[in-house]
Image: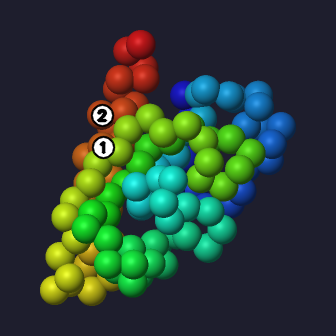
């Protein structure tokens, strides 16, 4: 598998097709919400908080030619604490992501 781990540049469609089902990434939201163009880093948590969401989280997903549109593999969610700034919430989401990603990679390698 190829793990992009938060890689931001858009991957060409031909590369996604060549590595279909073996190319994964992590995104700092509960996809399909808050994915797509411009939704990265603190922008995601700002949007989550502006929408008064109850939960934030992260998603490990397969990469396809779209932006954050590949099939979801696994997600982790946390309750949004509105005493935090979007940056602080993003830090909590990041901490969940660094726990989730190796778990997913291990599961995929052992299938």
Q: How far across and how far down the image is residue 45, in percent?
A: 39, 75
Seen in the picture, residue 2 relative to 25 is either above or below; the reply is: above
Which quadrant is home to the N terminus? top right
- CA gap between label 2 and label 1 equals 5 Å
Residue 45 shows up from this direction: no
Q: Label 2, on which residue? A: 103
Q: How far across and how far down the image is residue 51, in percent?
A: 39, 78
95 on left or right of 75: left
Seen in the picture, residue 49 relative to 34 is either above or below; the reply is: below
The scheme the figure's colours follow is: rainbow
106 on left or right of 22: left
Seen in the picture, residue 67 relative to 40 is either above or below; the reply is: above
Mark 1 crowdedness (10 Å alpha carbons): few <14, some 14-19, many ≥20: some
Residue ID at (25%, 68%): 54
Q: How far across and how far down the image is residue 44, in percent?
A: 45, 72
Dots 2, 1 in contact, CB < 8 A: yes
The quadrant where residue 74 appears = top left
Seen in the picture, residue 53 relative to 106 is either above or below; the reply is: below
Q: Residue furthest top?
A: 111
90 on left or right of 4: left
The quadrant where residue 28 appears = bottom left
Residue closest to the eye, 73 or 25? 73
- Tell me the SS state at disc 1: helix
Residue 67, disc: none
Residue 57 shows up from this direction: yes
Residue ID at (80%, 42%): 13
Residue 100, disc: 1
């Amino acid at each position: 598998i190829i793990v992009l781990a938060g890689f931001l540049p858009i991957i060409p469609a031909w590369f996604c097709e060549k590595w279909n089902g073996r190319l994964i990434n992590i995104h700092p939201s509960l996809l399909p919400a808050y994915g797509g163009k411009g939704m990265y880093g603190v922008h995601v948590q700002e949007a989550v908080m502006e929408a008064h969401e109850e939960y934030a989280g992260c998603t490990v997903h397969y990469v396809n030619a779209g932006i954050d549109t590949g099939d979801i593999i696994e997600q982790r969610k946390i309750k949004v604490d509105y005493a935090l700034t979007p940056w602080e919430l993003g830090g909590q989401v990041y901490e969940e992501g660094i726990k989730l990603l190796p778990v997913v990679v291990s599961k995929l390698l052992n299938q």
